[in-house]
Image (tube, rainbow, N blue to C red):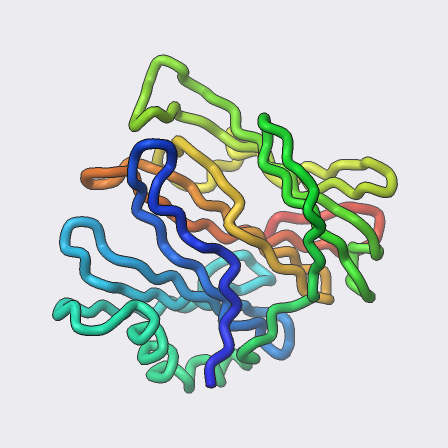
Amino acid sequence: MTILLCIFIPAVFYGSFPVQEPYLEIVGFSEDGCHLAYTLTGEYEGSAFPYCEIYILDLETGDVTETFFGVDETQSISCSLLMDNLITSHEEDFTEYGIAFGDHGVLLEFPPLDSPPDAEIVSFIVHGDVVGFPEGLYSLDLFQITTDSLTEYYEMNPSFCVLNLTRAENSISSNLLDSSISPLIEYTVYRYRQNGFLLHPSGYFVVFIACTVEGFEIPETVIIPLVFSFTSNDGTCELM
């Protein structure tokens, strides 16, 4: 039986308008901790054909090394069944990369703490021995900054984002990303949102960012994986 971790439930609407949202599920880390397999499923805009995409992410480089696609142009099966079929057909590829189904890394605890209106802040508690993450309370903080208030697309403006990791014990924040310097995608992004994150005991921190861009008829969301490597407990990290 395939064990997947769903780390995001797609929203159909932002405000008063619909958005094409892929559905992200985690297959698992590899046994050596160097790769991560995950899937994106949904329906194509216009045709409404169910699709599934499987990605193998190289954690040492931050690059996607393998991509497998499946689509049902007959619209006769669900996205979940399409995903199961695609995973089954690529079991040899998962074996080659040593993917351990159901290995979702460090078990994180998410306390019910409020996020301020000017940021998207997700708090989490780390337990156990993790490179670069002493036990304790942390938060992943995403700030969105408008770059052009005169240009509007479906009630949204062009923006960039800043991503910080904060440790509650000493209130020290590490800047992980500034998309005005390192863009996540080549297209204009109108909204950023955290789409879940995973932590591996070796110190790899995988963050998924949902970027809302212009679609064919309505806004669509592209899921971007970011891999950060924490090599010591002094808070230093590297974007892979």
Q: Is residue 109 above or below residue 145?
A: below
The residue positioned 64% from the left and 76% from the top of the image is 32
Question: Seen in the image, is 229 located left or right of residue 70?
Answer: right
Residue nearer the viewer, 34 or 144: 144
The residue positioned 79% from the left and 46% from the top of the image is 235
Residue nearer the viewer, 2 or 11: 11
The residue positioned 39% from the left and 34% from the top of the image is 189
Question: Seen in the image, is 212 located left or right of residue 1?
Answer: left
The residue positioned 58% from the left and 72% from the top of the image is 29
Where residue 95 appears, as percent x and y from the top left, is 49, 85
Which image quadrant for residue 116? top right
Where residue 204 appears, as percent x and y from the top left, is 66, 59
Q: Is residue 180 above or below residue 216?
A: above
Which image quadrant for residue 15? top left
Question: Seen in the image, is 209 located left or right of residue 14?
Answer: right
Where residue 201 appears, as percent x and y from the top left, is 73, 66
Which image quadrant for residue 74? bottom left
